[in-house]
Image (cartoon, grey):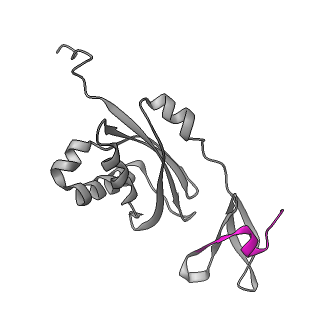
Amino acid sequence: MKHLPKHVRPRWRYLAVGIEAWPDAGIERSDFQRALWFAAGNLLGDPGSADAGVRVVAYSFRDGRGEALVRARRGTVSRARAAVACVSAVREHPVRVCVRGVSGTMRAARERYLDGLDTPERRSDVAFDGDARDGVCRGENVDVVAGDDGWVGARRRDCGTDGE
């Protein structure tokens, strides 16, 4: 089969997406893709979802943080951004998803908006609720183990871990 001429090929835009979840969440690429398709289908309907053509082309997730590169057709970027914003849970793990930027090539999107994943600092001396607890520190954010209830998100200054 012959290749299509350049002016007939579909044009794509690439959305750089940041993902945050609790540190014990294990989210695979296929799980995120399924959640994205489900969100796009619910928001845009089947024809709109097919027109936008959202697809995860690159993905990495580790220790509660991740990045993805999502491909969308040119002209449907605003609808694709809205669909990404509708993702609130992946495999019953609550997530925070944000679009960091949009680019015309995968390379430019990676260089400008995806900074790689830093390794979070696991600590066992996080002061929270009058007790020392286990926690995971990522920059200014601290995720504290709250017993059987799961995790609680806080800031370093709330937990007394400033400057350490």
Q: Residue furthest bottom?
A: 130
In the rendered image, residue 126, in percent from the top left (x then y), is placed at 75, 73
- Judging depth in this view, the residue of 93 and 102 nearest the camera is 102
Write the residue at 24% across / 23% down. 9
Q: Residue furthest right?
A: 163
Magenta-span inclusion, residue 11: no
In the rendered image, residue 83, in percent from the top left (x then y), is placed at 33, 54
Seen in the picture, residue 125 relative to 27 is either above or below; the reply is below
140 relative to 107 in the view: left or right: right
Write the residue at 67% across / 51% down. 119
Seen in the picture, residue 49 relative to 95 is either above or below; the reply is above
Seen in the picture, residue 161 relative to 29 is either above or below; the reply is below
32 relative to 109 in the view: left or right: left
Magenta highlight range: 152-164
Picture quadrant of residue 5: top left
9 relative to 119 in the view: left or right: left
- Judging depth in this view, the residue of 54 and 80 nearest the camera is 80
In the rendered image, residue 109, in percent from the top left (x then y), is placed at 49, 35
Write the residue at 41% across / 31% down. 104
Quadrant the C terminus occupies: bottom right
Write the residue at 26% across / 42% down. 53
Picture quadrant of residue 130: bottom right
